[in-house]
Amino acid sequence: MKYKLVKEVVDLLEQFELENSNRTYTYDINGFKKWFTYNQSDSQSFHEPNWEGKENGRSADSVINTLLVHMNRFAKSYSKAAIWDSDFSSQEDFIYLINLRAFGKMTKMELIKRNIHEKPVGILVINRLIAQGWVMQENSTTDKRSKLVSITEKGMEILEKHMGKIRQATEIVTGDLTYPEKMELIRLLKKLNDFHLPIYEKNIQPENLLEEVLNNKN
């Protein structure tokens, strides 16, 4: 009986290690307890929802992808409303400014990667912000090939002028979710982000991307 219990604990530890590959929980007893508690409560309250096409074999993966695309489009429509009749050309303008205000001076590529943009698209946004006088650039003291960018006083002013509407847009996107639901959504989205970000940073060519990710996942 004692050996059976030990085996069950070892099996649980192995499952914890496999499911915690993205380090959602710390690799210690506290992390294990949090993982175990969450999985116990989750399994007890689990209820599989219905979705369109489920009876015809439509997968959960397909539904998740579709809903994420829809949410992105909904969020963009609210962002457009927030910057309507302003000097911003797109939502990327104020998102780049918000990042610079929050995280301070950084290289152009750091700013572009933080926004998950391709380099040409990101450079266009940055150049537009520089032309408006909202962002300034300077030579890096550590790497002569890099340019550092930072938000200007004028950029701070334009951002603050429209932050009220921007905050309203972000609140609308989360809809009628309760606070616990928002926390759970953050946890799940962060888990997905932690999975995809290292892949994105490898800059794998499109023709090899799917095969390489699937091989590493398995």
Image: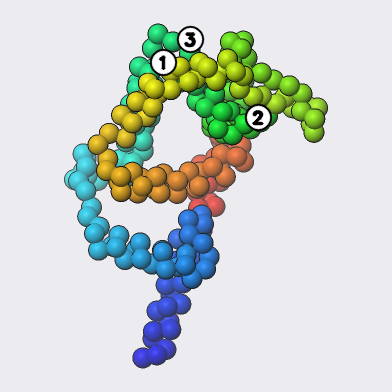
- State whether residue 150 is above or below residue 41: above
- State whether residue 189 is above or below residue 89: below
Q: Nearer the viewer, residue 109 or 118?
A: 109
Residue at disc 1, secondary structure: loop
153 sits left or right of 177 in the view: right
Q: Amino acid at mark 3?
A: Asp
Q: CA distance from mark 1 to mark 3?
A: 8 Å
Q: Quadrant of residue 150?
A: top right
Q: Earlier in the sequence, mark 2 or mark 1?
A: 1
Q: Which residue is mark 2?
A: 105
Q: Which residue is mark 3?
A: 87
- Say if residue 70 shows up in the picture: no
Q: CA distance from mark 2 to mark 1?
A: 24 Å
Q: Nearer the viewer, residue 45 or 51?
A: 45
Q: Earlier in the sequence, mark 3 or mark 2?
A: 3
Q: Amino acid at mark 1?
A: Ile
107 sits left or right of 84 in the view: right
Q: Amino acid at mark 2?
A: Lys
Residue 3: x %, y % from top left: 42, 89
Callouts 1 and 3 close, C-beta under 8 Å: no
Q: Residues within 10 Å of mark 1 (few under 14, many from 20)?
A: many
- State whether residue 30 is above or below residue 192: below
37 sits left or right of 175 in the view: right
Residue 91: x %, y % from top left: 46, 20
Residue in view at x 61 percent, y 25 percent: 119
